[in-house]
Image (cartoon, helix red, strand yellow):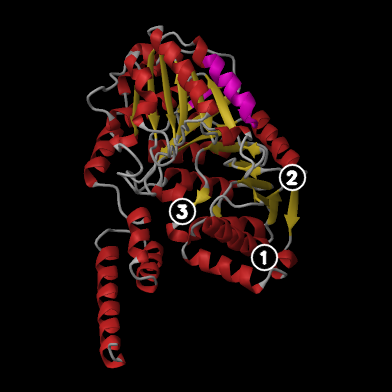
């Protein structure tokens, strides 16, 4: 048996090599300070296993893929948009044509994301998966020209197969069907799942050409968007994915509470454009060439003004996060937030604190059960911090709440795919609708109050009464929050 005098030097050498490798690994890519220190902590404190975790969570998106996305981002489909602007006139307006209360927000998105302000849209809110999929299936069934679908999760299960068979039938009718899905979010769904759809003339592609989660084992930089556009006239955006659990069929989660929008009007243009850019960055061989048919002139009698805003790691602007901060700082009376994850960075955390300490009625609703252990404990940590600042924290008790909504003063709201966490702010590709409509905002407030009746208020004392072990898990998870 080797003596201790030989073992200790070997251990010291391994520790030194591990530390050097950790520094080289972390600093070779540009990242913010919080994420840098978090990764150093993981790599140094958990040798070997830490590098395995880094392979899944820490690696950057390859530069060639980022270039493809940036290149497509420059294609703003200006001719189509200008045509709409010319024919719709006042229905697409610049920031100075709206009321002063939202002018700054409209300008923010115009300047940071080129997001047009679209007026006179008809928007319907869905909070139940059965109702959402029923309406979406009807719109897909009615499509005559094209169907564009982009989801983080497209599972090979009951609802996934129902949607696939519907798409196959539409493709057989000659409708141009295209599906983008994220291979990690759609774990278990392989290219062969869409084989018959492609035989019928449809197209299905994993986002940015990753063939499977196994070959592209990267948890970061996922396509977390949820977009459906039919004939350029009807669009869907929100939090629901395609899977049985989103219909409450998974015993682990129970009833699934989410929020999704159906949009009819010129607001669909930006959803259509977003899908085209993502598709063309993914499949250059079967590019979509924008045509007037994809951007029809839509005149509806609606009351909702909105902007579709997207963000992702191909752009350092963090547009959706900036929109959240703008909303938080704009709130005068009420700021109500629903999110399955509450892991804000310092800028968002400070904005929420300032709002609460300024007398704004700040309420945040999160699930009362985890779907990811570390993420849930980090959520509890930040919930306790915000409770101390005067924020009312609610745990949703009627299943699992997955909605990503924010509403202020019954005037402005946001609904989309972006959670209140680091991952949605910086690491994933997201899309949100920012809504300027008092009736719609008040409807979302009513939804919040209905959910509040099914939730429990967690007080500062409740957090203080938690066990030492639970507090330790929350604090440890918080240290990893920049990389969760």
Q: Which mark is residue 151?
A: none
**Residue at image coords 32%, 56%:** 55
Look at the picture and state if 334 lies above or below 35: above
- Nearer to us of marks 2 and 1 is 2
- Nearer to us of marks 3 and 1 is 3
Q: Dividing the image into 4 quarters, which one contains the N terminus?
A: bottom left
Question: What SS does tag 2 mark?
Answer: helix
Look at the picture and state if 134 lies above or below 418: above
Q: Which mark is residue 452?
A: 2
Q: Residues within 10 Å of mark 3 (few under 14, many from 20)?
A: many
Q: 389 left or right of 418? A: right
Q: In terms of image quadrants, where is residue 281? A: top left
User: Distance of mark 2 from mark 1, alpha carbons?
Assistant: 20 Å
Question: What SS does tag 3 mark?
Answer: helix
Q: Residue furthest right?
A: 453
Question: What SS does tag 1 mark?
Answer: helix
Magenta range? 118-139
**Residue at image coords 31%, 24%:** 77
Look at the picture and state if 380 lies above or below 15: above
Q: Which mark is residue 422?
A: 3
Give coordinates of residue 182: x percent, y percent: 39, 37
Whether tag 2 and tag 3 are in contact, CB under 8 A, the answer is: no
Residue beneath disc 1: 388
Give coordinates of residue 364: x percent, y percent: 65, 50
The answer to if 128 sits in the magenta stretch is yes
**Residue at image coords 50%, 27%:** 160
Q: Nearer the viewer, residue 189 or 220?
A: 189
Q: 6 left or right of 111? A: left
User: Distance of mark 2 from mark 3, alpha carbons?
Assistant: 25 Å
Decide if residue 82 is in sight here. Answer: no
Q: Residue furthest front?
A: 1
């Amino acid at each position: 048996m080797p003596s201790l005098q030989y073992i200790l030097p070997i251990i010291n050498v391994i520790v030194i090599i591990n530390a050097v490798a950790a520094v080289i690994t972390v600093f070779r890519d540009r990242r913010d300070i919080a994420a840098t220190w978090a990764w150093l902590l993981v790599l140094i404190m958990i040798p070997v296993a830490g590098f395995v975790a880094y392979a899944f969570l820490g690696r950057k998106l390859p530069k060639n893929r980022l270039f493809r996305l940036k290149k497509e981002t420059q294609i703003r489909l200006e001719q189509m948009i200008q045509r709409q602007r010319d024919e719709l006139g006042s229905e697409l307006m610049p920031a100075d044509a709206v009321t002063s209360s939202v002018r700054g927000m409209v300008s923010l998105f115009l300047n940071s994301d080129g997001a047009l302000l679209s007026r006179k849209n008809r928007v319907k809110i869905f909070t139940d998966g059965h109702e959402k999929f029923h309406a979406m299936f009807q719109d897909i069934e009615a499509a005559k020209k094209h169907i564009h679908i982009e989801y983080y999760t497209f599972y090979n299960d009951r609802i996934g197969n129902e949607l696939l068979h519907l798409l196959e039938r539409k493709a057989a009718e000659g409708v141009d069907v295209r599906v983008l899905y994220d291979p990690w979010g759609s774990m278990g769904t392989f290219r062969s799942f869409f084989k018959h759809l492609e035989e019928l003339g449809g197209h299905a592609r994993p986002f940015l050409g990753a063939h499977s989660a196994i070959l592209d084992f990267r948890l970061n930089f996922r396509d977390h968007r949820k977009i459906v556009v039919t004939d350029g006239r009807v669009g869907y955006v929100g939090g629901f994915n395609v899977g049985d659990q989103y219909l409450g069929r998974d015993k682990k989660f129970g009833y699934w509470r989410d929020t999704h929008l159906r949009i009819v009007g010129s607001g669909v243009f930006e959803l259509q454009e977003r899908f085209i850019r993502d598709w063309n960055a993914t499949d250059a061989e079967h590019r979509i060439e924008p045509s007037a048919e994809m951007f029809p002139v839509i005149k509806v009698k609606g009351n909702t003004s909105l902007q579709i805003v997207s963000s992702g790691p191909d752009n350092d602007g963090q547009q959706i996060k900036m929109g959240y901060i703008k909303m938080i700082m704009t709130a005068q009376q009420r700021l109500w937030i629903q999110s399955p994850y509450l892991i804000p960075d310092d800028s968002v955390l400070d904005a929420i604190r300032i709002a609460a300490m300024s007398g704004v009625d700040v309420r945040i609703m999160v699930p009362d059960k985890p779907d990811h252990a570390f993420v849930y404990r980090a959520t509890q940590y930040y919930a306790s911090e915000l409770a101390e600042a005067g924020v009312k924290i609610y745990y949703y008790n009627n299943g699992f709440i997955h909605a990503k909504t924010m509403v202020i003063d019954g005037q402005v709201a946001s609904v989309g795919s972006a959670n209140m966490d680091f991952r949605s702010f910086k690491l994933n590709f997201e899309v949100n609708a920012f809504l300027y409509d008092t009736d719609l905002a008040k409807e979302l407030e009513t939804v919040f109050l209905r959910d509040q009746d099914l939730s429990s208020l967690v007080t500062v004392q409740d957090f203080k009464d938690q066990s030492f072990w639970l507090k330790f898990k929350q604090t440890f998870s918080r240290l990893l929050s920049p990389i969760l």
